[in-house]
Image (spheres, coloured by chain):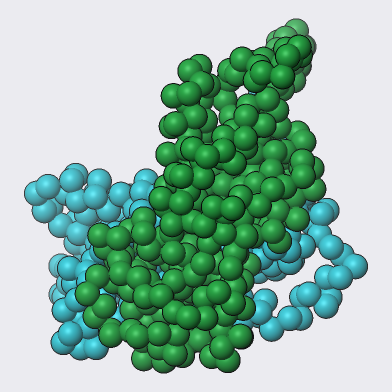
Amino acid sequence: MFRRTALAALAAVSALTLAGCGDDAPAASSSPSISSSTPALSGTINVFAAASLTGSFTQLGKDFETAHPGVKVTFNFAGSSALAQQINQGAPADVFASAAPKNMDQVTDKGSPTTFVTNTLEIAVPKGNPAKITGLKDFADKNKKIALCAVQVPCGAAADKVFKAVGITPQPDSLEQDVKAALTKVSLGEVDAALVYKTDVLSAKDKVEGIEFPEADKAINEYPIATLTKAPNPDGAKAFVAYVLSDQGKSVLSAAGFTAL
Amino acid sequence: MLLLPALIGLAFLLVPLIGLLAKAPWSTLPSRLFSADVWQALKLSLICATSATALCLLLGIPLAWLLARSGLPGRGIIRALVTVPLVLPPVVGGVALLLVLGRRGLVGEHLELWFGISFPFTTAGVVVAEAFVAMPFLVISVEGALRAADPRYEEAAATLGAGRWLTFRRVTLPSIAPGVVAGAVLCWARALGEFGATITFAGNLPGRTTTMPLAVYLALETDPDVAVVLSIVLLLVSVVVLASLRERWISGLR
């Protein structure tokens, strides 16, 4: 009886030790670069990016993988505030691209961020504009179904700023946790209008129509990007950020509706 | 040697809860606790979970009877379909509800046109979403109890001249009461903790559709301390309710 317990305990201890011995750093080539040319990249690059970057960054990821065979780029798209929290709690991210400087500031261990694009808000309505939305003042109409982003996420903070600047008190029916959720409600026809980014309207142009409004420039969202200090693949992180800031990156982002800087 | 795995299992379940209590911002707890948002979300959560459970009881007990006693052909398939909400990711459940009961949904379109009834973005929508995910628990529990119940009491009641509804009310239901209570408890707990289906189908608006899980999720994005406080409140309320259900009501031993 005692021997069996001892064996079980020994097995448990060895299992735990072996698990702890698992390598923390994945196979990333960290050979010192003698010349200034980019070192051979390998491994996986984990990019945490704001939901509004879904289409453009997925394309950039594919282009990057074609340019650097042997590298895999994986994405985690979500509301920027959720991503910042995940990174602070130890998520293994290499790059963070946020939809607002505020959420980038929430992350503590990072390289110096660079603003790479800006995005403006646009009103999104279902195809055909069934509720005949004309502008921002319709957002104060209680009889219309409105979706906004929650104030905690960049899209919601920008919307809040715009409404305050214009002096309209919106009557939302739902405060979504990221901009894509708000867009989905519009494309399903569940709401009459939502305030999302220009890029989101473009990405869903077969289901959604956009209505521009003049006060949009009161709250332009600046998107910063940064490598993370605890990145499992630091060379890959730097290379991907450099790619995003390059001309190829800029053209993909502009095509999606961003204003590349 | 069942003791060791049992203790590990218990630790696995308890340690996160202890961690929650340990990491709570005890110094600022009182001020955060009495903010209006907390009580609004809690009240809504409790009302919706209880309403969802009532709805599940109303519809689930007859459904369980259908599966256990009616002798309908194809019961196996019906039973499998009833358990689908258990395996379905809650957000998918929410999307499915939107596609059926939404403004352009199969049924919802007509509901809105003819009766002006709309479920998304309403408290009723929260109840529907919670009932959808929680009903399988009740149905399975009650079906099990019905199968285990002795049909001879019902036969005796019939020979004594009781009609079917009277028999069901006065003989069957009391004999399966522990199963019903256990199922209702599971149903209530599941409804209280529902997040994905609620936020997808009913949306999120404080006072109307923001339940505690939604409030915790959004608070987590900016102020984790508030999220911890909300979680502790929900935890305490759940523990109080579940602990106050005495074991003998669930096990049925007299």
Can residue B242 be seen here? The reply is: no
Image quadrant occupied by the N terminus of chain A? top right
Identify the colour of chain B in the image.
Answer: cyan
- Residue at 63%, 67% (x, y): give it: A152
| Residue B89 showing in the rendered view | yes
Which quadrant of the figure has residue A187?
bottom left
Q: Camera-side residue: B48 or B165?
A: B48
**Nearer to me, B19 or A53:** A53
In the image, A223: left or right of B21? left
Q: Nearer the viewer, residue B38 or B80?
A: B38
**Rendered location of residue A253, percent (x, y):** 48, 48
| Residue A192, quarter of the rendered image | bottom left
The residue at the far right in this view is: B27
- Residue A222, percent from left and from top: 62, 60
Identify which residue is drawn at 41% across, 92% down.
Answer: A141
The colour assigned to chain A within the rendered structure: green
User: In the picture, residue A19 is in which quadrant?
Assistant: top right
Q: Left or right: B118 with respect to B155?
A: right
